[in-house]
Structures are given as structure tokens and as C-alpha cells.
């Protein structure tokens, strides 16, 4: 846990204030009243009075209970104040605001939302730590210049592919069978050639994350005709 006493997998979401329907409240010289519904999940009322020096009284009462939640004489202050009023949702779902003023103006009312901590249980194992999908048997012939072969299809719900290990070999030495390992956006993550030997190769991608919703491919950039050599291997990955 960190200094905020939240688990490492907790996310704190800051929710913006809700402007109450009817705000700004226009008041006149004299007494003006307005009723404001408190949105679900909001129990703190914020009141901003730019013309506080002309306001002799502001009163907030519960529409259902009649409880006087707040009363103040803003003109007695030497500085502009922002007022906060606690409204218990179980008692009142709306409030009546009454302003007595010596000159017209506007009052701004918003509902203050609490921040929310969302806890998500960590995956075990995490997608970058170990494969959570069965190994893929890789068998394909070189597709020809500029063509691609899909090794792992795009995952449902725009999940990301996380590459772990890949062991493969080319069945023939072919000078112009070369290309790139990439995702389908495309982002190139490695290059390969069959021009050297037919010995096995190995790549540890250590849980490299591909673009969300993308597939994993081989694209041939060399000029060799299709089906000159075949790639055989096994690849492990996660999807999340």
C-alpha cells in the first residue's frame, strides 16, 4: 500500500461537480426563491455569490422536511465566500434557496461529488508475467512480396496480445524470404530472414504488449515468390 492507504490496484476517480438545473439562479432586488433538485449521489451543495456584498440573507431549506440547513448574511463578510451545505439524501432530494438582496445578480449552485476509489483484483498471473492462452502452433509458407500472414488473430473486445516466447525455423535457406514481425496497425516489433541457415531461432518478448484490438502478423518485404520456404514453430502469449 502507498501513502494513500489504497491497494496498488485501486484507482481513484475524481468526478466533476454537477451544475444544478436552474443554475445560475437570477435574483432580484428584494426576496427571490428557487427550488433545486439534488442529483443522485450528490449530498453537498456548493453556492457561489459574486454579488455577495449586496446580499443581506441567504437561506437553504429542505423542500420535504423544511429543515433550515444553512443561513448566512453574506454582506457582513469582508471577502467573497463560497458556501458548502450538507444535504442528507435520505431526508431531502431537493432544497429551496431564498436570497434577499439590495440589487439583482446571479447565484451559482452545483452539486459536489465525492471521489470514488475503484478496486480491481489483480490478474494472477498478470498478462506480462506468464501466458494465459494455449501455445500457438505456427505453420505458414512465405506469403510473397508485400503480403502478410496472421499468426494470432485480433482478440475479442479489443483485448491486447502480450507476446512471450517464440521458437521457430525456416525449412529452406532463401535469400529473399525476409520480412517483419508486426501487429496489424502496423507496429514492427522484429525482423527476420530465411537467408542464413535453417537452424531454430528463439525470441523472448518478455510480455511485450501489442496495440489493443490488433492481430500479430508476419509481413514479407523480400522479393521471393510465395511458397519458397515455410516457417514452423511455437509461440506463447497472453490476451487481456
Image (cartoon, grey):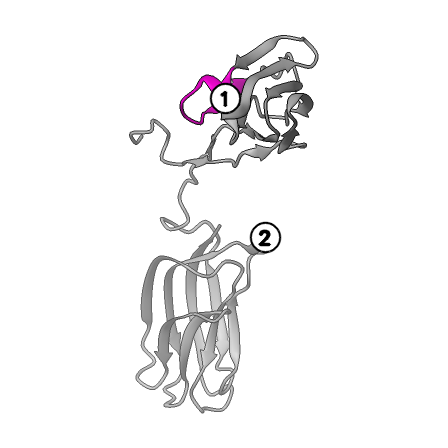
Residue 95, x across and y down, in percent: 65, 18
Pick the front one: 19 or 121:
19
Residue 232, x across and y down, in percent: 44, 73
Pick the front one: 19 or 73:
73
Task: Name which residue lies at 59% across and 55% down.
Answer: 156
Residue 87, x across and y down, in percent: 58, 17
Secondary-structure class at tag 2: helix
Characterize the local packing of mark 1: few (<14), some (14-19) or many (20 or more) Cα atoms within 10 angstroms: some
Q: Is residue 128 left or right of residue 109?
A: left
Secondary-structure class at tag 1: strand
Task: Name which residue lies at 63% across and 20% down.
Answer: 97
Task: Name which residue lies at 60% across and 9% down.
Answer: 68
Quarter of image, res 77: top left
Q: Is residue 183 left or right of residue 31?
A: left
Task: Name which residue lies at 67% across and 25% down.
Answer: 37
Pick the front one: 164 or 50:
50
Residue 183, x across and y down, in percent: 47, 68
Residue 77 at least partly seen: yes
Magenta-drawn segment = 73-86
Q: Is residue 207 magenta?
A: no
Quarter of image, res 200: bottom left
In front: label 1 or label 2: 1
User: Marks 1 and 2, how far apart in space?
Assistant: 43 Å
Q: Examine the rendered structure and indicate whether residue 163 appears above or below residue 39.
A: below
Q: Is residue 75 magenta?
A: yes
Could you say which disc has been placed on residue 84 in the image? 1
Name which of mark 1 and mark 2 comes first in the sequence.
Answer: 1
Q: Examine the rendered structure and indicate whether residue 197 appears above or below residue 12.
A: below
Residue that carries the numbered disc 2 in the rendered image = 157
Amino acid at each position: 500500500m502507498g501513502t494513500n492507504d489504497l491497494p496498488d490496484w485501486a484507482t481513484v476517480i475524481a468526478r466533476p461537480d454537477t451544475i444544478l438545473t436552474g443554475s445560475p439562479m437570477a435574483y432580484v432586488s428584494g426576496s427571490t426563491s428557487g427550488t433545486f433538485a439534488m442529483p443522485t449521489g450528490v449530498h453537498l451543495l456548493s453556492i457561489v455569490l459574486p454579488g455577495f456584498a449586496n446580499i443581506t440573507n441567504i437561506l437553504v431549506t429542505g423542500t420535504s422536511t423544511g429543515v433550515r440547513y444553512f443561513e448566512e448574511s453574506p454582506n457582513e463578510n469582508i471577502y467573497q465566500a463560497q458556501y458548502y451545505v450538507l444535504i442528507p439524501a435520505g431526508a431531502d432530494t431537493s432544497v429551496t434557496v431564498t436570497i434577499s438582496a439590495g440589487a439583482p445578480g446571479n447565484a451559482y449552485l452545483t452539486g459536489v461529488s465525492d471521489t470514488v476509489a475503484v478496486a480491481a483484483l489483480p490478474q494472477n498471473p498478470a498478462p506480462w508475467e506468464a501466458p494465459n492462452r494455449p501455445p500457438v502452433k505456427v505453420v505458414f509458407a512465405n506469403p510473397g512480396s508485400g503480403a502478410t500472414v496472421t499468426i494470432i488473430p485480433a482478440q475479442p473486445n479489443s483485448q491486447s496480445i502480450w507476446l512471450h516466447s517464440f521458437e521457430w525455423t525456416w525449412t529452406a535457406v532463401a535469400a529473399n524470404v525476409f520480412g517483419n514481425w508486426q501487429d496489424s496497425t502496423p507496429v514492427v516489433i522484429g525482423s527476420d530472414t530465411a537467408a542464413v541457415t535453417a537452424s531454430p531461432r528463439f525470441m523472448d518478448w518478455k510480455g511485450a504488449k501489442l496495440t489493443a484490438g490488433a492481430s500479430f502478423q508476419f509481413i514479407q518485404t523480400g522479393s521471393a515468390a510465395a511458397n519458397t520456404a515455410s516457417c514452423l514453430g511455437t509461440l506463447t502469449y497472453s490476451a487481456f
